[in-house]
Image: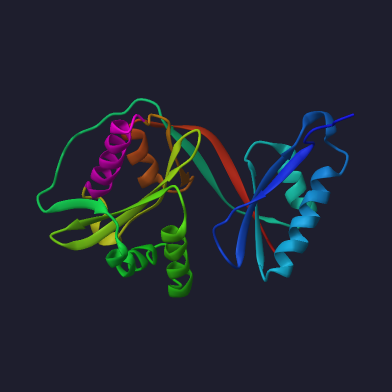
Amino acid sequence: MSWGCLGYLYIDRWGVKEKEMTGMVAPAFRRQGIFRQLYDAAHAECEARGVVSLVLIGEEDYKPARGFARSVRADHEFSEHEMWLENYQPRHHHSPDFEIHAATLDDKDEMVQIIMTDIPNPEDARQLVEDFYAAENQKLFVATLAGQALGCLRLDYRSYAVGIYGFVVRPEYRRHGYGRQMLEYVIELLHTENVYEIMLEVDTNNDLAIGLYKSCGFAVRITYGYFSRKI
């Protein structure tokens, strides 16, 4: 008899010392220790590869996910909303001297400096940008004002949607509408490519970003909790 897939655990490709995990078990086979076996195998593999921290991701309101995190001594670090574009609301305001372009190798150092706004460690920021450039099915963009780089983002093309990630605007350029201009640019670019399933993720405490996304037509569909554990 073929039982098919009972469950899975996925380890995100991003990061070297820290790895994010998510997964599930088919409803009929839950409460039998299957996910714990998957987790133990993944834990051993990550430890062998020099990973020092694991981050388990589960639905915020799903009690078994929180219970499992507690059982492996993982602490809640933060939560993120998954938001999807449902009713696009453009403003079409374009600031003088504002431009956005597809990133080239010449933009790599600038992208590292922008990413360091959120990831202060230069080594970690550079590794993340290197991963961006090396990944398949990605497009990277850099925004400038009068030639000075102010922000960046990447588009992650998936089979079911395109995700907007790595969206960072330098602090001194925030609250001036440049983030919205970046967002409108990539949304309209995706529409020309006949992509209408567009999503992104945002920290639940980032009220400024959440307000921007909602004003553009994004809505929260689900909220995930992130639980961290040192190996």
The image quadrant that residue 47 belongs to is: bottom right
Q: Nearer the viewer, residue 96 or 10?
A: 10
The image quadrant that residue 13 belongs to is: bottom right
Which secondary structure type mostly characterizes the magenta part of the structure? helix
Residue 63 location (% of width, % of height): 72, 38
Residue 227 location (% of width, % of height): 65, 53
Residue 96, relative to residue 16: is it above or below? above
Q: Which residue sits furthest top?
A: 87
Does residue 89 appear in the picture of this structure? yes
* Structure colour scheme: rainbow
Residue 216 location (% of width, % of height): 31, 34
Residue sitting at x 47%, y 68%: 127
Q: What stretch is highlighted in magenta?
A: 177-194
Which quarter of the rendering shows the N terminus? top right
Which quarter of the rendering shows the C terminus? bottom right
Q: In this view, does 154 lie to the left or right of 3?
A: left
Residue 191, relative to residue 69: is it above or below? above
Does the magenta segment cover residue 178?
A: yes
Residue 196 location (% of width, % of height): 38, 29
The image quadrant that residue 183 belongs to is: top left
Residue sitting at x 47%, y 48%: 205
Q: In this view, does 165 lie to the left or right of 79?
A: left
Does the magenta segment cover residue 157?
A: no
Residue sitting at x 62%, y 40%: 60
Residue 96, relative to residue 30: is it above or below? below
Does residue 72 appear in the picture of this structure? no
Q: Which of 66 and 3 is in front in this view?
A: 3
Residue sitting at x 44%, y 65%: 130
